[in-house]
Image (cartoon, grey):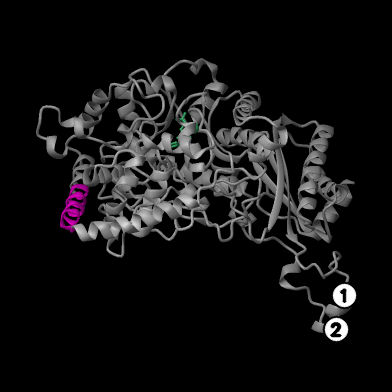
């Protein structure tokens, strides 16, 4: 490809998203992998498309280089002044008061499959299909097999590779077990995917008088005890660095970055920019080829040129990377609409045990509500059956409550109506809060003041029966990531604008690193600022309405599935390319998207979004009651019969 495409080893410059190294691929014969991928795709439309992409990036690099060459000394000194001032401002915003921990499960889907089928242990295996691999075991990674690689190429790299189909219910189940552990260390933890989360462990360290290293070791151990799976952990003063750290000693390792400016600056001084969430392959290539930037420290040295060539928001981001800054505050919820608690456990139909678990959950929920002085009037029970079917049942109460006794009384009625049943998860959510401190907790009781001022007795909208809409709004960032158009760089004020890592976008607390910056859109979704984020099709949560204090927060995308083949070979949903002759692979690929879509809906419903959003699959699987709330009257009729 590129300049060397006509040489002896044309594959050497053939880079695709699946030639990028992931953890466990350190010793891989990269040239062999590139050659196999090159040979298997040579001559295809995919290959031609890669060439067009490469040409576009080259054009971009040439144009930026030309802009750079035109800079006068005066221009450079002007931009240097701006950069110096901004570096000082950003430095003064440095917050070293927090300890953040990032945890990432090791080869997550593959590890779950191996746990459930120990005969896979020690063998090269991949989860996915011949058209697409979701992840690969560390044994398979030694051959260059990795996530996002087509299975037929992986098989060529590793002929003995075992394929296991995806089973998202299983991954969600194990993910929930890990979250039970996370909530013990940070009740407001931020989950960014099924296998990753950020925890602010500052309070845990202070209150228990233990070091962050102890917390990391304890958390890793608890996760192993609860799930039988290993994870890797990074600890640092902010989330951006914590995520970089968790990747350093993968698998089953940890890395602690000390909480002081010196340690951070030393750490980032040699950190390759590609390791930072928000900097993808193309960004890396452009910065390297135009400005010779390879490490985070280079960002600071080239600050003037960055300001000259890129938008202010992009340059702010680059400079904050150079300083090792990242999000430190837990985003505060606004207008909380619900509060919930849930437990995952080994499937059981033992009713006394189930009611005991329900009592524990009611107690946790009550404590959480009392901490925030919340009183609620809509109670939802969530159940997951032994066969992973998820059901929700809800009732509106006659008064606002927050005591354990009240919650348990109503929750027990809801649960009793469902039994006998074998369950693996129970959860309770309270919503429809009493938001007017001056109105009575019993909505039937009209205050004299309200009577005198309004003169009517109709309940206000906020007091009506029923359900709140989805507690979070999910912003689809994948639309831009997965652009199938020719590679484009969004321009802001005539300068290139680089994207932020979605998770940092939603959490960044840097003064001017705002989220107004438009994400880059590269061809076919093969490029993004953060390959990992993009590959997992994650989106960000819209902070304006997000309820971050819910125990479960998953960034998942809303992407309507309407996959078809553009130009007869490009998948419209992800930009992945499979030639028409691969009929089965193409079918599998579309099936993969369908499964992914259903899983995302499941994730969203696990956020306890509105009942209308129950996935099509769940509707099919469910009983007649699934997806519907029992009207309050019929509930009591039914319940009375059972009592
Ligand atoms: N995943 C996916 N498609 C991708 C990348 C990941 O479906 N392109 C899924 C499968 C992974 C899970 O997300 O198991 C977590 O992704 P990670 O990037 O954390 O990868 P792993 O956990 O598999 O491996 P590790 O974290 O050890 O590198
Ligand atoms: Mg992982």
Instruction: Establish if 304 lies above or below 462.
Output: above
Q: Against 303, is 179 above or below?
A: above
| Disc 2 residue lies near ligand 1 with CB under 8 A | no
Q: Position of residue 135 (x, y in %)?
A: 43, 31
Q: Quadrant of residue 315?
A: bottom left
Relative side of 43 to 416, left or right: left
Q: From which residue to which does the magenta span run?
A: 56-72
Q: Residue at x 77, y 32 (%)?
A: 349
Residue 455 visible in image: no
Mark 2, Cα crowd under 10 Å, few <14 / some 14-19 / many 20+, is: few
**Residue 212 visible in rendering:** yes
What element does badge 1 sit on? loop
Q: Quadrant of residue 170?
A: top right
Left or right position of 14 against 22:
left
- Marks 1 and 2, how far apart at CA: 9 Å
Dot placed on the residue nearer the N-terminal end, 1 or 2: 1
User: Where's residue 585, x and y in %?
Assistant: 34, 35
In the image, taking residue 86 as reference, residue 215 lies left or right, namely right
Left or right of 304, for residue 478: right
Label 1 neighbour load within 10 Å: few <14, some 14-19, many 20+: few
Q: SS class of the residue under badge 2?
A: helix
Q: Which residue is mark 2?
A: 452
Number of numbered labels in the structure image: 2
Q: Is residue 380 magenta?
A: no
């Amino acid at each position: 490809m590129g300049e060397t495409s006509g040489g002896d080893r044309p594959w050497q410059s053939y880079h695709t998203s699946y030639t990028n190294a992931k953890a466990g691929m350190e010793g891989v014969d990269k040239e062999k992998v590139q050659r196999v991928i090159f040979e298997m795709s040579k001559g295809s439309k995919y290959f031609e498309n890669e060439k067009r992409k490469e040409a576009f990036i080259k054009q971009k690099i040439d144009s930026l280089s030309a802009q750079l060459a035109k800079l006068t000394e005066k221009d450079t000194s002007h931009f240097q002044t701006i950069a110096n001032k901004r570096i000082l401002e950003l430095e003064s915003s440095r917050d070293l008061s927090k300890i953040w921990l990032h945890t990432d499960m090791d080869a997550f889907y593959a590890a779950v499959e191996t746990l459930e089928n120990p005969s896979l242990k020690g063998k090269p295996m991949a989860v996915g299909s011949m058209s697409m691999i979701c992840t690969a075991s560390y044994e398979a990674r030694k051959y260059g097999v990795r996530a996002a690689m087509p299975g037929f190429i992986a098989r060529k790299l590793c002929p003995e590779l075992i394929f296991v189909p995806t089973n998202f219910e299983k991954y969600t189940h194990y993910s929930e077990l890990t979250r039970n552990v996370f909530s013990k260390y940070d009740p407001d933890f931020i989950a960014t995917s099924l296998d990753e989360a950020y925890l602010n462990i500052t309070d845990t360290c202070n209150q228990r008088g233990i070091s962050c290293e102890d917390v990391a070791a304890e958390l890793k151990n608890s996760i192993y005890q609860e799930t039988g799976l290993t994870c890797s952990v990074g600890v640092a003063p902010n989330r951006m660095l914590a995520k970089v750290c968790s990747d350093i000693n993968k698998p089953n390792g940890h890395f602690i970055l000390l909480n002081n400016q010196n340690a951070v600056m030393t750490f980032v001084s040699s950190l390759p920019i590609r390791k930072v969430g928000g900097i993808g392959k193309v960004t890396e290539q452009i910065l390297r080829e135009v400005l010779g930037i390879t490490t985070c420290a280079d960002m600071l040295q080239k600050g003037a040129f960055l300001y000259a060539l890129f938008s202010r928001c992009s340059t702010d981001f680059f400079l904050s990377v150079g300083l090792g800054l990242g999000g430190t505050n837990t985003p505060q919820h606004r207008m909380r609409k619900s509060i919930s608690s849930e437990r995952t456990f080994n499937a059981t139909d033992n009713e006394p045990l189930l009611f005991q678990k329900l009592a524990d959950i009611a107690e946790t929920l009550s404590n959480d509500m009392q901490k925030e002085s919340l009183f609620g009037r809509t109670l939802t029970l969530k159940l997951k059956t032994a066969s992973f079917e998820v059901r929700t049942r809800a009732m509106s109460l006659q008064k606002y409550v927050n005591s354990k006794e009240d919650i348990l009384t109503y929750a027990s009625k809801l649960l009793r109506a469902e039994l006998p049943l074998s369950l693996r998860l129970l959860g309770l959510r309270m919503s429809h809060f009493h938001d007017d401190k001056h109105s009575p907790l019993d909505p039937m009781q009209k205050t004299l003041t309200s009577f005198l001022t309004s003169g009517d007795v109709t309940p206000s909208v906020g007091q009506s029966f029923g359900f709140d809409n989805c507690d979070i709004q999910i912003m689809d960032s994948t639309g831009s990531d997965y652009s199938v158009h020719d590679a484009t760089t969004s321009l802001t004020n005539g300068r290139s604008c680089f994207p932020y890592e979605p998770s940092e976008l939603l959490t960044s607390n840097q003064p001017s690193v705002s989220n107004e910056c438009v994400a880059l859109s590269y061809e076919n979704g093969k490029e993004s600022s953060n390959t990992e984020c993009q590959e997992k099709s994650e989106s960000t949560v819209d902070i304006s309405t997000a309820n971050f204090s819910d125990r479960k927060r998953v960034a998942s995308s809303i992407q309507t599935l309407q996959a078809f083949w553009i130009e007869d070979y490009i998948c419209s949903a992800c930009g992945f390319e499979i030639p028409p002759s691969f009929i089965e692979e193409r079918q599998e690929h579309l099936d993969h998207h369908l499964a992914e879509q259903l899983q995302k809906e499941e994730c969203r419903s696990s956020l306890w979004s509105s009942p209308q959003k129950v996935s099509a699959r769940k509707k099919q699987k469910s009983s007649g009651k699934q997806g519907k709330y029992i009207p309050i009257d019929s509930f009591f009729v039914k319940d009375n019969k059972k009592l």
